[in-house]
Amino acid sequence: TTTTATGQWTKSFTPNVNTQYRAFYRPTNDIGGWTRNVTVEVRKKLVAAVAPGTKILAGKKLSFTGRLPAVTDVATYYGDNTVQVCIQYFTTGVWKKRTCTDAAANGDFLVEIRPGVDADGKYRVWSGLAEAYADSFSKARTITIT
């Protein structure tokens, strides 16, 4: 790209995976330089269904199902499509992992818990999607235990 008279420039990218960028420049006197590396992380949209619903009896099975995006991309980049999916719950101001499982080769997942009494709160599904992507997570769901 070219710069303005004051040296400003802009360039847009839409990476498909986590990518590092660095700009090089060479002014007319041939003494140039470069910028620091900037990492742009790509987060994938993760959608999870909850069954049997957001109100359940204590000790009953609560299932989160869905399909992880980009699992086949992970296999392409890393030669392994083993990707973990975890249920997280929100407590004391942070998200904590509760239980994890491997997604299927096509990205389908089923992860389950049996919440006990006093386990009301926000839950979501999380996946690191390997090093190719930023941590991705589903919309938080408020689960009420009766």
Image (cartoon, rainbow, N blue to C red):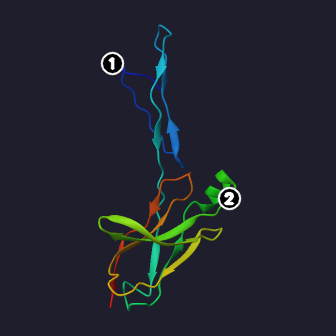
Looking at the image, which residue is at 34% across and 70% down? 90
Q: Nearer the viewer, residue 4 or 81?
A: 81
Looking at the image, which residue is at 33% across and 18% down? 6
Mark 2 or 1, closer to the camera: 2
Could you tell me if the residues under marks 2 and 1 are in contact, i.e. CB atoms within 8 Å? Answer: no
Q: Which residue is mark 2?
A: 80
Q: Nearer the viewer, residue 138 or 130?
A: 130
The tag on residue 111 is none
Reply above or below: 38 against 140: above
Reply above or below: 58 against 67: below
> What amino acid is found at the position of numbered circle 1 in the picture?
Thr
Q: Position of residue 14 (x, y in %)?
A: 49, 45
Q: Position of residue 111 (x, y in %)?
A: 52, 77
Q: Pick out the residue farthest to the left.
A: 93
The tag on residue 6 is 1
Q: Position of residue 39 (x, y in %)?
A: 47, 41
* SS for callout 2: loop
Q: Position of residue 60 (x, y in %)?
A: 44, 90
